[in-house]
Amino acid sequence: MMRLADPQYTYDKTLDECHSGITGNNSLKKKLNSNKKNLTDAGDNYSELSRKGELYLIKAINSKKGDDPVVLNDLKKSELMKFYDTYFVPEDKPTRAIYDYLLNSAKEKCPFCGGIGTPRNLDHFLPKSQFPQFSIYPRNLVPSCRDCNMDGNPIGFSETAEDQIIQPYLDDDRFFLEQWIHASYSKGVYDPTPGNFTYFTKPPAHWCDIDKKRVEKHFVEFNIAQRYSTKAAEHLGIALGQLNYFIKKTGVRDDDFIRDFFKSSADAASFPNHWQKGMYQALIDAILLP
């Protein structure tokens, strides 16, 4: 939906900061130090696969509730998760600066829902319970609003290529630079009573089937249709008010002028799949409706 800038903190730097914040547990501190390369190699593999749309190839750990399997070399699941819960999130740890940086990097716009919600915490794109080796990997930590947060929800955990949602840091530019969310309006723009907006996915025809299915998956999982329709409905009164003001002032219905006016508003949307772009495009299509 929305591209996030690549974090300025590398996995290497993050692990160093985490290491410096471990107190009272020399055994874990030594394990982190001896496994640093294993962890950074895992992070490099994560990034490479994600850029190719193949993050699903990383297998989740197979463990039952209460199990504490070894995940990476001699690091156990509980130890990897502790890196996040005990040594990354707390305010008094060096890595808290990284947490705050990542959260603030979204500029109060949740990347999963196109900025509808405001991020309140960091979400693990690959859930830390199934992929604990990425519990403090910056590219796996995505600022998320409460409605989109996936922790405890396996949305981001996919076993097939077409079932993957969009990775804000690493996925292909096409998902962020090309329009695949569109909308329709239920009435003509000159109808005095407000109509309804319906949002839907319509990816470019040249996209492969897997990518088309991926955006549909993302669209459905994050309830974009309803959330965008609600946002557009809130803004509709302003758009129609501007239209009616023009008609009242000029005494004419100039379709070309209205089309250009709505187009300028559509073009002003901050990214191609913003609710505003689809809304004004739908109003343009509705100019010729009765």
Image: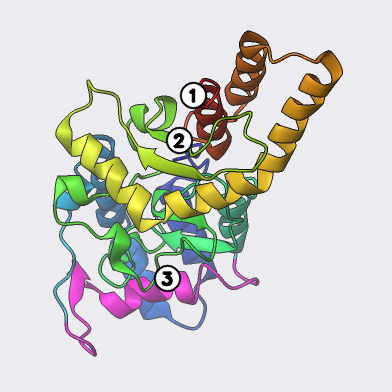
Give the labeled residue for mark 3: 83
User: In terms of depth relative to the viewer, which is nearer, 14 or 218?
Assistant: 218
Q: Is residue 119 above or below residue 12?
A: below
User: In terms of depth relative to the viewer, which is nearer, 253 or 279?
Assistant: 253
Q: Quadrant of the N terminus?
A: top left
Q: Amino acid at mark 3?
A: Phe
Q: Amino acid at mark 2?
A: Ser
Judge from the rendering whether residue 247 lies leftward or rightward of residue 162; answer left or right: right
Spatial CA span between label 3 and label 1: 52 Å
Give the labeled residue for mark 1: 285
Spatial CA span between label 1 and label 2: 8 Å
Judge from the rendering whether residue 267 lies leftward or rightward of residue 130; answer left or right: right
Mark 2 or 3: the one toward you: 2
Q: Please state the horizontal and vertical placement of residue 149, each as a whole percent of the image.
A: 46, 64
First along the sequence among labels 1 and 2: 2
Numbered mark located on residue 184 in the image: 2
